[in-house]
Image (cartoon, helix red, strand yellow):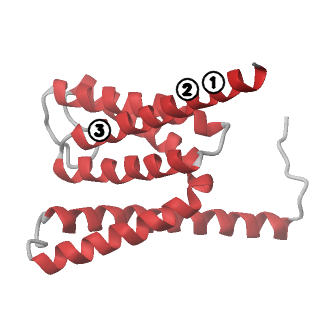
């Protein structure tokens, strides 16, 4: 069985370059979020107050762009969470990260991050089929920023807090929609 694309070769090449461009742009945004977060926290060489201000401005700018484009990246974020869950599951089994250089941590730390990211992935799974609503978009951007704070500070608490906020927003929206439907039927 051969899988062939019916499009002309020129269209396939243009599509490949377009996809590569999106991947590179995504990597740039991930880098900007992480560097801005490191500046805000004051990690490494970013201990002066001017770095914290620049980091805050960077986080604000990237968050604004993420708010505007959330419909495009929400599905991909679920995939990223899945990848991170898989990597954490392997790390929990090994007791160290599978990356080079390998980082040794107690298995409980890996399991803690695994549970928090699994909770976030369950909440975000609905964005595979539905676009996030306005308030959900704000909570989703908050989850992305909190994930960067968790990465920089090596603590799962920011991600847990943001996932709880996203869950509360989804719960409130579901109750509001249920109330609205019951009023219309009455």
Q: Callout 2: 10 Å neighbours few (<14), some, many (20+)?
A: few
Is any atom of residue 156 visible in this view? no
Residue 175: mark in rendering? 2
Residue occupying the point 11% across, 66% down: 44
Q: Is mark 2 on a helix, strand or loop?
A: helix
Residue closest to the eye, 140 or 22: 140
Residue closest to the eye, 155 or 105: 155
CB under 8 Å between discs 2 and 1: yes
Residue occupying the point 21% across, 63% down: 38
Q: What element carries label 3?
A: helix
Compared with residue 166, is residue 4 higher up or lower down, i.e. above or below? below
Q: Callout 3: 10 Å neighbours few (<14), some, many (20+)?
A: some
Give the CA distance from mark 2 to mark 3: 21 Å
Give the number of the mark in front: 2 or 3. Answer: 2
The residue to which callout 1 is attached is: 178
Q: Earlier in the sequence, mark 1 or mark 3?
A: 3
Q: In which quarter of the image is residue 186?
A: top right
Name the image quarter holding the N terminus.
top right
Residue closest to the eye, 185 or 6: 185
Residue 106 at x, y percent in the picture? 13, 28
**Would you say 15 lies left or right of 146 here?**
right
Q: In which quarter of the image is residue 47?
A: bottom left
Q: Is mark 1 on a helix, strand or loop?
A: helix
The residue to which callout 3 is attached is: 161
Disc count in the image? 3
Compared with residue 135, is residue 38 higher up or lower down, i.e. above or below? below
**Would you say 4 lies left or right of 138 here?**
right
Residue 28 at x, y percent in the picture? 43, 68
């Amino acid at each position: 069985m051969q899988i062939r694309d019916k499009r002309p070769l020129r269209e396939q090449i243009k599509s490949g370059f377009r996809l590569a461009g999106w991947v590179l742009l995504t990597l740039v945004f991930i880098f900007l979020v992480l560097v801005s977060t490191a500046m805000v926290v004051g990690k490494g060489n970013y201990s002066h107050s001017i770095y914290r201000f620049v980091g805050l401005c960077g986080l604000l700018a990237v968050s604004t762009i993420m708010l505007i484009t959330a419909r495009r990246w929400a599905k991909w974020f679920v995939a990223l969470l899945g990848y991170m869950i898989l990597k954490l599951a392997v790390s929990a089994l090994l007791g160290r990260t599978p990356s080079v250089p390998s980082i040794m941590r107690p298995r409980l730390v890996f399991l803690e991050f695994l549970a928090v990211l699994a909770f976030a992935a369950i909440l975000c799974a609905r964005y595979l089929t539905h676009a996030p609503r306005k308030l959900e978009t704000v909570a989703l951007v908050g989850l992305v920023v909190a994930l960067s704070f968790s990465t920089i500070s090596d603590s799962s608490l920011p991600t847990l807090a943001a996932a709880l906020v996203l869950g509360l927003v989804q719960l409130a929206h579901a109750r509001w929609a249920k109330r609205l439907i019951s009023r219309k039927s009455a």
